[in-house]
Image: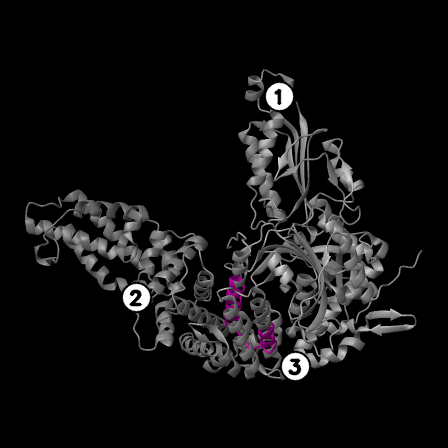
Amino acid sequence: MKKDFLIEIITEELPPKNIMTIIKSFYRNVINECEKKFIKYNKIIWYATCRRLSIKINKIKYKKIIINKLKKNKKKILVKIKEDIKTIILNSIKKINFKKVMHWNNTKIKFIRPIRNILCMLKNKKINLKILNIKSKNYTLGNFFIKNNKKIYIKNVSNYKKKIKKEGKVIIDFLERKKKILKEIKKKIKKINGKLIIKKKFLEEINYMIEWPKIYIGKFKSKFLNIYKKLIKHVVENTQKCLIIYSKSNNITKHFVIISNISKKNSYRIILDNENIINEKLQDIIFFLKLDYKKKLIENLNKLKKHIFHKKLGTFFEKTIRIKKISSWISKKIKINKKDVIRASLLSQCDLLTNMVFEFPEMQGYIGMKYAIREKEKKKIAYSIKEQYYPLFYNSKIPKNKISCTISISEKIDTIVGLFISGEKPNSKNDPFYIRKKSIGIIRILLEKKLKIDLIKLIKISIYLYLKNKIEKTLKNKIIKYFKKRILSLLIKKYNFKKCFIMSSINTYKIIPIIIYRNTLQISNYKNIEILKNTCKRIKNITKNKKNVKNKKIKEKIINNNIEKKLYFILKIFKKNIIKMIKKLKYKNIFYYINIICKITNVLFKKIFINDKNKQIRINRILILKEINKQFNKIIKLKYILN
Amino acid sequence: MKKEKIFCLQKIIQIIEHFWEKNGCTIVPSLDIPIGAGTFHKETFFNSISSKKFSRIYLQACRRPSDSRNGKSNSRLQHYYQIQVVINPPPKDIQKKYINSLKALNINPKIQDIKFIEDNWENKTIGASGVGWEVRVNGMEVTQFTYFQKMANLECNPSTVEITYGLERIAMHIQNKNNIYELIWNEKLNEKIKYKEIFLYNEIEQSLYNLKKSNIKEILNFFKKNIKESKRLILLKNPLIFPSYEHLLLSIHQFNLLESRKHFSIIERQNYIYKIRNLSKLIAIKYCIKNNINYKKK
């Protein structure tokens, strides 16, 4: 009973960016459901285009247990297999991972886009099925544009791919389409000596916009090549879904690739129309540039007074002034030119009022940078306007130059603190203002740029700028706690550190990410951690439940044992120097002491009885042991390694 | 090969209207109030909230003050025309019907590159949103195709389909013109009446008004007064739904005028939108109550 099975769902155009996730989710669901029903197969294949989602199961059959149960009665097996397939498909569709679904008729049914046909067959027979109120058919529909949705009857599932290509003008296979697109582009751009630079995601999107790709090359007017690169890219790629062609030296050329849905009969007109529309859009950009060039960027500063940043946090002008103040403070700490930082701060928000950013909000920062360069601001200052928004994503690049870092930190801390003050702090599910991303951004900059800025002070200054003299200790502590959590999770995730090693470095009176990192790294590399652990465990066991030691001090005079004397002597030096050593990162010394102390302590455990009959001596010994743990705790939070 | 006839704009309007009339749509007049999109027409706004069957087609002038280009852009206008087809519930073959309407205009999908590009339409002021596409012919957007999921922030179930033809854009494709003002509006024997004859000076003066000469203080005043009047009418014991809605539309236009003067910051703009949206929702709910329509807040 080995047969091929096929289901194809035809919809109106699916969102190309999501098709990959959708079809893969569908595919995985089918695999899981088959497992549940004890169904074996040779292979499951998925196909997807902008208008269809298909799953083909090759050589479907039951596992032996089921076949034996059905006593190899062929008819019985077939009936049951049909029933099971229905369940498999229905469940798999129900569980597809969609971001958003929609209504499209007067039933309660929802799907990602309107479903217009369902083909469902086992070898050469239709399987009758009603999915989302639509009855299955034994035909598919050809290309919507070229074949006008012509009905194509599938006589045998194994012919599906070929038949739909030949009769329906649909290349159903994602890889085959991609190959065809790339091959045709390469052939065409060879003639103009061009080069293709395309991100995988964008190629995927393009590939999912068509069923029958044909490639043409167009060009826009050369005069537009002077427009800023990113704007050209935005118009050609993001808006028009065409691909820019680069020169061999990686510059944008006037040529672009048009990926069309249909055949070549009318290529001249298709190219011309696409050229016209891109020319027109680039012309519009020149209109905005000309308007913006009429005044300097800094002239927008005063106008920021009229623009509310957030109703509880004042105007963009007020924000700018706060950024300026925080930045000035940072500039002193990291020793960079204060004048430059102030200039950069004042310019930082000015591009928000340009016509260009008004039209293309996603260009904020970039436009500020370009205009600043044009106005002959220092390069570093100009770049900082763009880089203040870095990192854009959790893992993306951080600002390069130190001015950018300064503005970026100031802009971010101001927003974070402001939102905490206005009560819009994030929770685990909701973070509409990207506070989490912003705080991780600050930490990453401090860490990766090795800037020794104390986060606690930074937070204090930022709070002061909002609240002036009002002291808000709980607020401050809340924000500090929030940052500590972020540092912790970042160090664990990114550097694979253990929580116990980070914890001791993080709970200090200063929070300087790079120092926390270095401390943790040193501790993580400590070799004798097991010995330390065992020693501390024993100490803990012996000292626990010992009352009468509270508020008592070690009495040096009554130490009579030599080993004990030695231990106490070293402990004293250790205690005296430990903070200094930590500050100077002298971990070699620290670990040297820890090693010795552990060693002597263990000898002590062997040689003497801690719980001496003499009460005084007994208490004294407990106190010494407790002191050891206390000092070790400054290096490594013992409670995290002991539990 | 037979030379295909090239249609003037006036003819394009007639063909589209005729096509949908044959497909069961009722032709209704345009709304006599400045609006930014055909969706604001009372026929669409109120009918798509209710679940009753309807199909309408209308020609609607639209105003987009922010798109003012002083008559200098070849394709952008602060005033243009749309044909709006609105049907509830959507026929199964609605996409095909739409393509056939293009065929009636001699736009052949076998030789012109037609694409449905994902574009989920949304208008925050009247709380309308839908799932859909912009339809492009050889890269030029000529139509917005939307299945409404929400109107006045109330759930649309059944969903209403709306097809919006951008007339000037379609004409530019059909007449193969780069410049909107060169479009042929009407053709008589030997005389051609161009788009610029009818609209260019209007476009220049209106742009000047929208971008520079409007009195921000006064418009803010108009805005507030219209909101106030709209509220008063909807809060009457027997609410006057349509007059209230019209005052709301006037205020939206004034909001757009303020926006074209860049009066708002991004966040402040939000506050204005909330104000309008809440009122539009109130109007929709009163309409539902008066007409015994079950509504679901989204």
**Residue B261 picture location, percent across and down:** 60, 78
Instruction: Tell whether A489 sits left or right of B225.
Output: left
Q: Is residue B275 magenta-colored?
A: yes
For the question of whether residue B8 can be seen, the reply is: yes
Q: Bounds of the magenta span? A: B253-282
Q: Which residue is mark 2?
A: A474
Disc 1/disc 3 C-alpha distance (Å): 78 Å
Badge 1: few (under 14), some or many (20 or more) residues near its Cα, within 10 Å? some
What's the amino acid at mark 3? Tyr
| Tag 1 subunit | A
Q: Which residue is mark 3?
A: B209
Q: Are marks 2 and 1 on the same chain?
A: yes
| Tag 2 subunit | A
What's the amino acid at mark 2? Thr
Of badges 2 and 3, the one in the foreground is 3
* SS at circle 1: helix
Q: Nearer the viewer, residue A363 or A608?
A: A363
Badge 3: few (under 14), some or many (20 or more) residues near its Cα, within 10 Å? some
Instruction: Tell whether A487 sits left or right of A257.
Output: left
Q: Nearer the viewer, residue A183 or B115?
A: B115
Name, please, the residue furthest toward the right.
B1
Disc 2/disc 1 C-alpha distance (Å): 70 Å
